[in-house]
Image: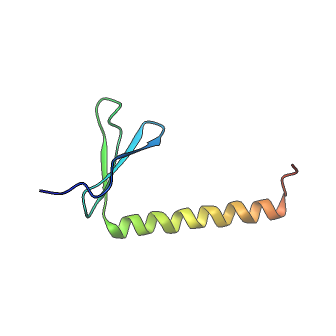
């Protein structure tokens, strides 16, 4: 039995996240067939590193081509 440590969350674009104490699960439960991906901690870390790389690229692009407000 896995206690619910964190409530499931809707992320947007039809994607939901849940946590079983080890994996972060992403699924498309609003669509059929439901597709699921289980991210183990090492894969989640790699995803965060990728997210940081994207953020750094965005910040570099903005400093090169500033957006006027």
Q: Is residue 65 left or right of residue 33?
A: right
**Which residue is drawn at the image coordinates 37% and 65% (left, top)?**
43
Residue 36 picture location, percent across and down: 30, 45
Q: Nearer the viewer, residue 33 or 15?
A: 15
Q: Is residue 58 left or right of residue 7?
A: right
**Which residue is drawn at the image coordinates 68% and 63% (left, top)?**
57
Residue 31 picture location, percent across and down: 35, 30
Q: Quadrant of residue 1?
A: bottom left
Residue 56 picture location, percent across and down: 66, 67
Q: Quadrant of residue 20?
A: bottom left
Q: Is residue 18 left or right of residue 66?
A: left
Residue at far left of view = 1
**Which residue is drawn at the image coordinates 34% and 47% (left, top)?**
8
Q: Is residue 68 left or right of residue 50?
A: right
Residue 48 picture location, percent across and down: 48, 65
**Which residue is drawn at the image coordinates 29% and 36% (left, top)?**
34
């Amino acid at each position: 039995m896995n206690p619910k440590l964190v409530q499931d969350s809707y992320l947007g674009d039809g994607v939901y996240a849940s946590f079983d104490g080890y994996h972060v699960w992403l699924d498309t439960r609003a669509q059929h067939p439901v597709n699921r991906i289980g991210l183990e901690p090492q894969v989640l870390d790699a995803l965060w590193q990728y997210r940081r790389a994207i953020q750094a690229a965005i910040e570099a692009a903005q400093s090169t081509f500033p957006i006027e407000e």
